[in-house]
């Protein structure tokens, strides 16, 4: 049941919104759309509420997939390295929710430096915490 719910996340925007009109009549209006809308009529920098929901849920779907794989790989050697995509997908969700898509925080060079820094930190942490395992696994000592 959870897999079906998670796999339908990217398509929820088709269920609760109508193209060019906004939210469907049966969806309760909690004022979220007007709360997220700025003075120019954009929803957190997106052209419509429908596009915002679609983009946000696509990124949330990917993030939950990485987090699920991280928790599933409990006794695997590669588990610490899964923190890199988990962190990057969470970073992108924060960028979307904070309306920072046009700032320097969403530039490719910042994301590249973040990726490299996280990868190096995960590799060093993995190496220093698992020397015996690495020697046994790769050097057959």
Image (spheres, grey):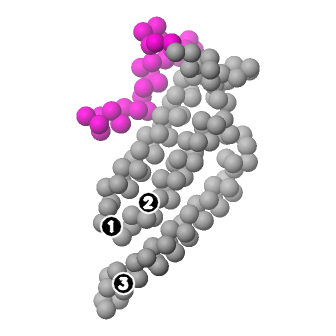
Residue 128 versus residue 105 in the image, above or below: below
Tell me where residue 46 appears, x and y as whole percent: 64, 28
> Which of the labelled discs sits on residue 106, or is there none?
none
Q: Residue 12 in magenta?
A: yes
Q: Residue at x 49, y 72 (%)?
A: 125
- Secondary structure beneath label 1: loop
Tell me where residue 4 appears, x and y as whole percent: 29, 34
Q: Earlier in the sequence, mark 1 or mark 2?
A: 1
Q: Which residue is mark 2?
A: 82
Instruction: Mark 2 and mark 3 in contact? Answer it, CB < 8 Å.
Output: no
Label 3 vs label 1: CA separation? 15 Å
Q: Residue at x 37, y 32 (%)?
A: 8
Q: Quadrant of residue 43?
A: top right
Tell me where residue 22 appears, x and y as whole percent: 55, 14
Q: Earlier in the sequence, mark 2 or mark 3?
A: 2
Tell me where residue 44 appears, x and y as whole percent: 64, 29
Q: Which residue is mark 3?
A: 132
Q: Quadrant of residue 40?
A: top right
Q: Which residue is mark 1?
A: 76
Q: Which residues are magenta?
A: 1-29
Q: Quadrant of residue 42?
A: top right
- Secondary structure beneath label 3: helix
Label 1 vs label 2: CA separation? 11 Å
């Amino acid at each position: 049941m959870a897999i079906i719910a998670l796999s339908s996340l990217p398509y929820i925007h088709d269920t609760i919104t109508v193209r060019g009109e906004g939210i469907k009549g049966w969806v309760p209006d909690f004022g979220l759309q007007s709360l997220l809308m700025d003075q120019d009529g954009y929803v957190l920098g997106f052209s419509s509420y429908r596009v915002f929901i679609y983009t946000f849920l696509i990124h949330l779907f990917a993030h939950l997939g990485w987090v699920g794989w991280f928790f599933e790989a409990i006794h695997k050697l590669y588990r610490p390295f899964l923190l890199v995509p988990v962190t990057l997908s969470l970073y992108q969700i924060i960028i979307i929710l904070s309306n920072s898509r046009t700032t320097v925080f969403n530039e490719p060079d910042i994301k590249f430096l973040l990726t490299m820094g996280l990868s190096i930190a995960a590799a060093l942490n993995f190496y220093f915490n698992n020397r015996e395992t690495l020697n046994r696994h790769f050097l057959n000592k």
